[in-house]
Image (spheres, rainbow, N blue to C red):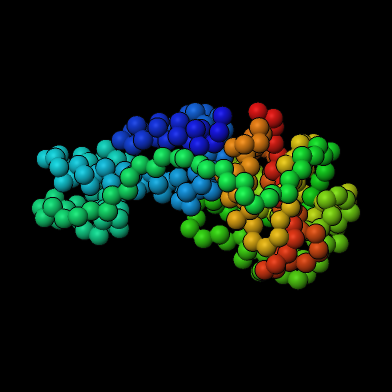
Amino acid sequence: MDWNIRLNRALDYIEDSLADEIDFDYAAKLAFCNRNDLSNMFFVVTGVQLSEYIRRRRLSLAALEVQNTDNKIIDIALKYGYSSPTAFNRAFQNQHKVSPQYARSRKVFINTYPRISFQVTIKGDVNMKCRIEKKSAFSVLGVKKTFRNDSEENLIPNFWRNLPQETYDKIIEQASDEPKGLLGVCANFDGEHQFDYYIAVSTKNSDVEGLGRIEIPEATWAIFEGEGPLLELINRIFVEWFPSSGYRRADNSIPDIEVYFDYDLPKENYSYELWFPVVKE
């Protein structure tokens, strides 16, 4: 089933549940994925975090109810997930630029966000270099930092830029296995928005003080060759390749991996591979 169909199934449920508590595990089940993949895929396709989209939709419906019913504003706030008038008033003003009371009394224009409907077009007009390979298990050693995928700014490049030279040298010293090069490893997805990111190398060495180890199990990988910024290629992989490939991403227990061939920090123009664990549909 194509990703656009899957996302629409999940979004139908979310839309029907905006005035209730949303079961994200159930929404993900409708999309035949886990909740982290649902959130990631939504962001890749739309450029908006799923949590932010839901917030905008709820505040849009709340504003319509404020303006077109006599329901108490506190009741409307509770209906759309706000436990206090203060929190609702702040969120309402951030989106609509006026208070709920003002919106009701003056009938001003409000900033509503319509429901999204996914209609993904598979262009295929630019080649993607991809191969499917089964790889044995291997270990990586590196430094770890925890991030969230619902933050407005991608903070991972800062992690690379701010890596102390002595730490960088310590990591490079451990390189002794395939894949060769520096690795960016996205692991330990918590099913919400949090994950760990390792700057690491593949190694056969034992544990090293100050470095974290993660075991990569045997898996089948979709490996994509790229050059330059990653996000454009990642977007194409999820929007173009996955819907038409007959593969889906494997369980979140297996990380995603970036492979940088030179033992040097990623620069503006660099060659790399993106490894996604996959299973046949």
Location of residue 243 (image quadrant): top right
Location of residue 102 (image quadrant): bottom left
Q: Residue at x 71, y 39 (%)?
A: 277
Instruction: Give the residue at the far bottom of this rendering.
Output: 165
Instruction: Give the residue at the far front of this rendering.
Output: 125
Quadrant assignment for the N terminus: top right
Q: How many marks?
A: 0
- Residue 182 in sight here: yes
Location of residue 270 (image quadrant): bottom right
- Residue 238 in sight here: no
Q: x and y percent of residue 276 in the render?
A: 69, 43
Question: Of residues 213 and 67, which is closer to you in this image?
Answer: 67
Q: Residue at x 36, y 35 (%)?
A: 15
Question: Of residues 263 and 7, which is closer to you in this image?
Answer: 7
Q: Residue at x 25, y 44 (%)?
A: 62
Q: Is residue 67 left or right of residue 53?
A: left
Question: Of residues 138 and 119, which is closer to you in this image?
Answer: 119
Q: Residue at x 16, y 46 (%)?
A: 67
Quadrant assignment for the C terminus: top right
Q: x and y percent of residue 76 in the render?
A: 22, 41
Question: Of residues 153 and 226, which is closer to you in this image?
Answer: 226
Q: x and y percent of residue 123 in the render?
A: 58, 46
Q: x and y percent of residue 7 in the render?
A: 48, 36
